[in-house]
Amino acid sequence: MSPLLYLAQRATALILALTVAVHLGTILYAVRGGLTAGEILARTQGNGAFLAFYAVFVLAAAVHAPIGLRSVLREWTGWRGRSLDIGMIALSALIAVLGLRAALAVFLA
């Protein structure tokens, strides 16, 4: 793994550790508070802080996951070269687009 990919993997791991903890904490708070899906949506829609938080979460996942999967595929399948890199870039773009689309849908709901 190149030094740049190594640093990107570790930096996004740090971001994901924080965002996952906040995300799970928020879920626990909502469930223990007895909030319904409608009440949760009412609190999150139009909230720029929630949109920014989940955008950071999604973008970190879109960088982190393909780097890790790239390493696994190289080791387990022997898939190497430019096609692997292009496949992982495509996966990264897919995760980013779908995740940001979901976050934006909640924001605009």
Image (cartoon, rainbow, N blue to C red):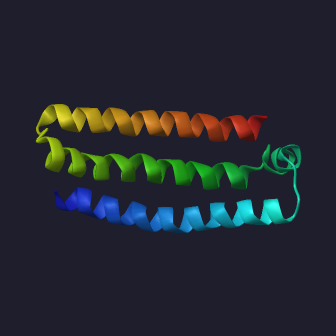
Q: Position of residue 20 (x, y in %)?
A: 56, 62
- Quadrant holding the N terminus: bottom left
* Quarter occupied by the C terminus: top right
Q: Tell me the residue at 41%/35% (across/down).
A: 93
Give the image location of residue 53, x and y in percent: 62, 56
Depth check, front residue: 18 or 35: 35
Residue 27 falls in image quadrant:
bottom right
**At x 83% / y 45%, what residue is drawn?**
37
Q: Is residue 92 left or right of residue 96?
A: left
Q: Is residue 12 left or right of residue 18?
A: left
Residue 6 is situated, as x and y percent measured from the top left of the image, at 25, 62
Q: Quadrant of residue 88?
A: top left
User: Count the marks: how many?
Assistant: 0
Q: Residue at the location (32% across, 59% down)? A: 8
x then y, percent, for residue 47: 77, 49
* Residue at x-position 29% and y-position 47%: 69
Q: Nearer the viewer, residue 20 or 32?
A: 32
